[in-house]
Image (cartoon, rainbow, N blue to C red):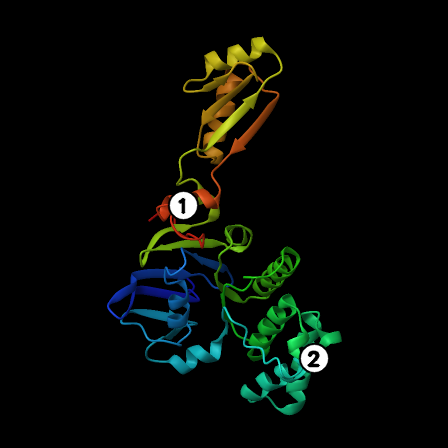
Amino acid sequence: MTEPAISALGLRKSYGGKTVLDGIDLRVPAGSVFALLGPNGAGKTTAVKILSTLVTADGGQARVAGHDLAARPQAVRAAIGVTGQFSAVDGLITGEENMLLMADLHHLPRREGRRVAAELLERFGLSDAAGKPASTYSGGMKRRLDIAMTLVGTPRIIFLDEPTTGLDPRSRHTMWRIIRELVTGGVTVFLTTQYLQEADELADRIAVLNDGKIAAEGTAAELKRLVPGGHVQLSFTDPTTYRSAATALADVTRDDDALTLRIPGDGSQRALRTLLDRLDTAGIEADELTVHTPDLDDVFFALTGGTGTPHQPTEATR
């Protein structure tokens, strides 16, 4: 199997006697988006800081971009980019000057640095504002510039720590588009977010961090199946067909006024096929079929005990 972009085994970290990470395991496939969710203070940012070499773990092992985190931190730094919760943009200089500063820090030749800066400013829709002080940029523009600066070194892995916090919905959707484009280009994205919809929209896999441990990990669909409450609703216009369906199907909740039946289910393809086969065998056809599954809000609160601010889950198989 191809080596994952990020792997960690038993990562531990404490501050002042308080355990923040209590032996977490992570595996992030290359070219994917991995979302780490959890209540505020759950340790998401600490995990990012450890994996990006900003702080050292108290225990455990990790490999990032094929390099051992403890033995080859410089090689890890050369392969990654980090966009933290707080912008690294210098508001006293222009957007272009911020980009050129990053190019200098990456030791790019002057001509190459200017070319890369111009291309990235164009890619992120900042060319028209390139000569203006970054302090005049909107929140969304500063966030785009922040990520553009991160890309100057062409990282293979990018850590995005709550990249859309405080952005308006339009700017947030713009950031989502940018993240998708990065992954399409082969970049691996490790994302923490406060927005459950964001993880649902972007992440190939999601992990929920709670009390220093990974509470669950998996795809969004897998996680949603962890929470009870999923069901299929059948709606009918003909009372006779409705009564026949109610008789043919076991364990249903009836609504005789609305002529609807609710059948418990996890929303999986197998469960849905089984239900449809039963209806076909009985010669019954519903006028409308709707699949209802719990959303990530339900998953989050179920896994974290209903406390804290949403900030998401991963492997439903744990």
Q: Residue 124 sits in which quadrant?
A: bottom right
Nearest the viewer among 98 and 186 is 98
Quadrant occupied by the N terminus: bottom left
Give coordinates of residue 92: x percent, y percent: 62, 83
What is the distance, in whole Å, between disc 1 and disc 2 at their CAs? Answer: 44 Å
Q: Report crowding for label 1: few under 14, some 14 to 19, many 20 or more residues within 10 A (C-alpha).
A: some
Residue at coordinates 55% horizontally, 79% vertically from top-left? Answer: 153
State whether residue 101 is above or below residue 244: below
Q: Evaluate if marks 1 and 2 touch, with contact meaning CB atoms under 8 Å apart.
A: no
Q: What amino acid type is highlighted by mark number 1?
A: Phe
Residue extending furthest toward the top: 240
Q: Is mark 2 on a helix, strand or loop?
A: helix
- Mark 2, residue position: 118
309 lies left or right of 238:
left
Sooner in the amino-acid sequence: mark 1 or mark 2: 2
Residue at coordinates 50% horizontally, 68% vertically from top-left? Answer: 85
Which labelled disc corresponds to residue 12?
Answer: none
- Mark 1, residue position: 301
Give coordinates of residue 290: x percent, y percent: 56, 29
State whether residue 128 is above or below residue 180: below
Nearest the viewer among 202 and 141 is 141
